[in-house]
């Protein structure tokens, strides 16, 4: 028996015997899904429960998430975590998702749109992403809150949600390998991730207008690009922002900046901008989530 084990060990080492799939390292893929960058979505009438076309947009969003899941599986993914990262965080029709997929829903979350990611993941994918509030192009271009924020910077660099989320993934050594959205969003995120596969499901015309693919065409493109991204993950580099990290948040109105400056960890840079220094991107993310979510009358 000892001799047999020795022979088998040698054969495994030279590649003549492969280990069972179950013994191999799982290929885990994280998929963060927003709505503004989904094919066919162009106005606020599609983005929230009060909009007349929200139900249809939820289906578009769900179908693109399903396409991304299938693309990841085509590339060998064995475990998938999906983050519902738009609005109230309860947009995806989760009863339509595969039974073995887990879903992050609702808020608040310490890692925001990237909650649940860790170093066990091999790749991250962004679906339905939009351009930043500083971008002069892009359908529904904003950064986290179109109602309150006019800019977010990390160490002096203006970042879109995709850049911030890429930094969170990078903190855990996870590269972003594919993105879908309009042409402005795809180009913007590539400034942080490098030339990853991008599914441009629409071309921005204005803040509320686009030349868009049909839902089925969008889904097929997403599946193809996600598969390519996951397959090419070895060539993708994590976007890493090393600490300490200086965060700057600029508000449309001055009162938020004024009140936040009461905190000893916050510096007011001007009437509309505050600065916070975090040890790493995780601490920065928790601070941003606090700023965006806290309300004095908050209840369970």
Image (cartoon, rainbow, N blue to C red):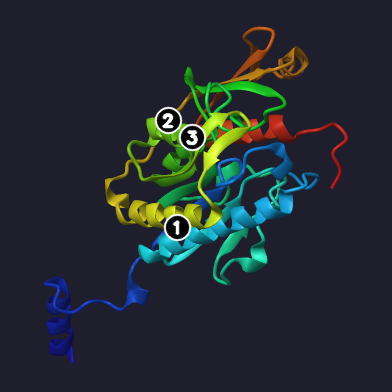
Q: Mark 2 and mark 3 in contact? Answer it, CB < 8 Å.
A: no
**Crowding at mark 3 (Cα within 10 Å: few <14, some 14-19, many 20+):** many
Looking at marks 2 and 3 on the same chain, the residue that comes earlier in the sequence is marked by 3
| 161 on left or right of 265 | left
Instruction: Compare residues 169 and 183 and report the one nearer the observer.
Output: 183
Disc number at residue 185? 3
Residue 50: x percent and y percent? 81, 45
**Crowding at mark 2 (Cα within 10 Å: few <14, some 14-19, many 20+):** some
User: How far is mark 3 from mark 1, CA to CA?
Assistant: 19 Å
Which residue lies at the image location 32% right of the left edge and 41% below the top edge?
A: 237
Residue 266: x percent and y percent? 65, 18
Position of residue 157 relative to residue 69, above or below, is above
| 264 on left or right of 73 | right
User: How far is mark 2 from mark 1, CA to CA?
Assistant: 33 Å
| 236 on left or right of 291 | left
Q: Residue furthest top?
A: 270
Residue 233: x percent and y percent? 32, 51
Q: Determine the secondary structure under disc 1.
A: helix
Q: Is residue 30 visible?
A: no
Which residue lies at the image location 31% right of the left edge and 79% below the top edge?
A: 20
Which residue lies at the image location 86% right of the left edge and 43% below the top edge?
A: 299
Instruction: Compare residues 118 and 59 and report the one nearer the observer.
Output: 59
Q: Which residue is mark 2?
A: 241
Q: Is residue 85 visible?
A: yes
Q: Which residue is mark 1?
A: 220
Q: Determine the secondary structure under disc 3.
A: helix
């Amino acid at each position: 028996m000892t001799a047999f084990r020795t022979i088998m060990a040698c054969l495994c080492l030279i590649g003549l015997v492969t280990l069972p799939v179950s013994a191999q390292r799982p290929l885990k893929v994280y998929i963060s899904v927003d709505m503004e960058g989904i094919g066919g979505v162009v106005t606020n009438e599609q983005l929230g429960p009060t909009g007349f076309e929200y139900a249809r947009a939820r289906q578009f969003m769900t179908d693109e998430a399903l396409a991304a899941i299938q693309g990841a599986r085509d590339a060998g993914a064995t475990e998938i975590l999906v983050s519902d990262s738009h609005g109230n965080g309860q947009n995806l029709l989760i009863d339509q998702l595969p039974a073995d997929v887990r879903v992050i829903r609702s808020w608040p979350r310490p890692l925001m749109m990237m909650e649940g990611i860790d170093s066990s993941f091999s790749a991250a994918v962004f679906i339905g992403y939009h351009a930043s509030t500083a971008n002069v192009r892009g359908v529904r271009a904003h950064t986290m809150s179109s109602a309150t924020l006019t800019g977010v910077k990390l160490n002096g660099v203006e970042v879109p949600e995709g850049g911030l989320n890429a930094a969170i993934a990078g903190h855990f050594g996870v590269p972003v390998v594919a993105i879908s959205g309009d042409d402005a969003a795809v180009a913007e995120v590539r400034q942080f991730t490098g030339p990853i596969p991008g599914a441009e499901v629409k071309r921005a015309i204005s803040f509320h207008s686009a030349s868009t693919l049909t839902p089925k065409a969008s889904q097929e493109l997403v599946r193809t690009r996600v598969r390519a991204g996951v397959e090419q993950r070895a060539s993708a580099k994590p976007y890493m922002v090393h600490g300490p990290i200086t965060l700057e948040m600029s508000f449309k109105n001055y009162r938020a900046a004024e009140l936040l400056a009461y905190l000893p960890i916050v510096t007011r840079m001007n009437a509309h901008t505050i600065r916070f220094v975090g040890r790493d991107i995780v601490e920065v993310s928790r601070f941003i989530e606090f700023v965006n979510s806290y309300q004095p009358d908050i209840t369970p």
